[in-house]
Amino acid sequence: MLAADLSRSKGAPPRVATVAALRSAVARWRRAGERIALVPTMGALHAGHLALVAAARARARRVVVSIFVNPTQFNEAEDLATYPRDEAGDLAKLAGARVDLAYTPSVDEMYGEGFATTVTVGGVSEGLCGAHRPGHFAGVATVVTKLFTQCAPDLAVFGEKDYQQLLVVRRLVRDLDLPVEIVAVPTVREADGLALSSRNATLDPDQRRIAPALYATLVETAGAIVAGAEPARACAAAAERLRAAGFTAVDYVELRAAETLAPLSAFRPPARLLAAARIGPVRLIDNVAVPVAEC
Ligand code: AMP
């Protein structure tokens, strides 16, 4: 199974690309009674992904990182075509992170001929990114369900960066009785507050200068809401501030209940402030707890 990996760069984890090879590696660990963690990613790895790996490492003897740019969660062909990909760089970044296996299935391996099943999560999938990216969360829920049944991990690690996705996955696991513990990791940021994202690599220098306004605006708006500002007004002011900073379109800025994503017309903790905005072709998302927990 691992013969093809003899050429891999020093310290990089072995790589498998088929469900059968993944299952056989996992079965060996399972027989040895080892706890297994899965970190699902779409590659173009950065320090945010590595924080997820570290959280997995701290909780399990074995860590699998999947790298799969999932076409079914892209609602724009252009976005899929331009999504950054760097498998060799990714494997090099995983060297030293003590990852036991990189799982890199092809699209054909994941979605075989005649594939016709979709997992749809209601409730938390609706609104926010669900409203602006039709089909996105069904694509996420379907691939996550497949990754869970392919790998059968004890736990899986997700980032709060994609907060709505995290709640969709938690709902999915509860509703389908999937025997996987979901671990959440706080958002890793650049020094100027910009949340790390694979898409940041596609920002030109001017766009990169504008991008940190997203987090700064969320923090300021969260503070205003805690201080008594009416949420709808504060969110409208935030959208205005983002446009003034150079964002070309604001998909949403909204205050939601942190555990259910129910809309909140008045501040009631635990709450979450979430936003999505575009700078030209690049769509950025971010969110903060209200009151802000991470700085
Ligand atoms: P992606 O490769 O963008 O699909 O992300 C894979 C996982 O990494 C998801 O669970 C994301 O929420 C998480 N992630 C992405 N960016 C960050 C970040 N800046 N901090 C923490 N987790 C992140």
Image (spheres, grey):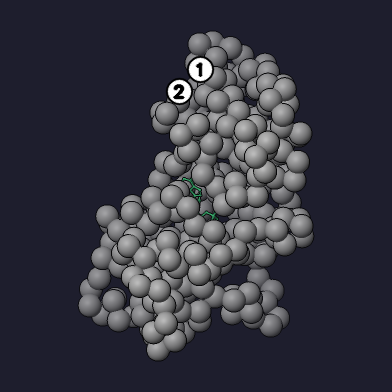
Q: Is mark 1 within 8 Å of ligand 1?
A: no
Give the residue at x 36% y 65%: 95
Q: Which numbered marker is on residue 291?
A: 2
Q: x, y (%) of residue 16?
A: 46, 79
The quadrant the N terminus occupies is bottom left
Q: x, y (%) of residue 5?
A: 41, 82
Along the line of sight, the residue nearer the viewer: 162 or 213: 213
The quadrant the C terminus occupies is top left
Q: Mark 2 Cα within 10 Å, few/some/many (few <14, many 20+)? A: some
Along the line of sight, the residue nearer the viewer: 277 or 169: 277
Give the residue at x 44% y 42%: 188
Identify the mark nearer the N-term, 2 or 1: 1
Q: x, y (%) of residue 203?
A: 65, 44
| Mark 2 touches mark 1? (CB < 8 Å) | yes
Considering only vertical position in the picture, is 31 above or below 209? below
Is residue 148 shown to the viewer in this render? Answer: no
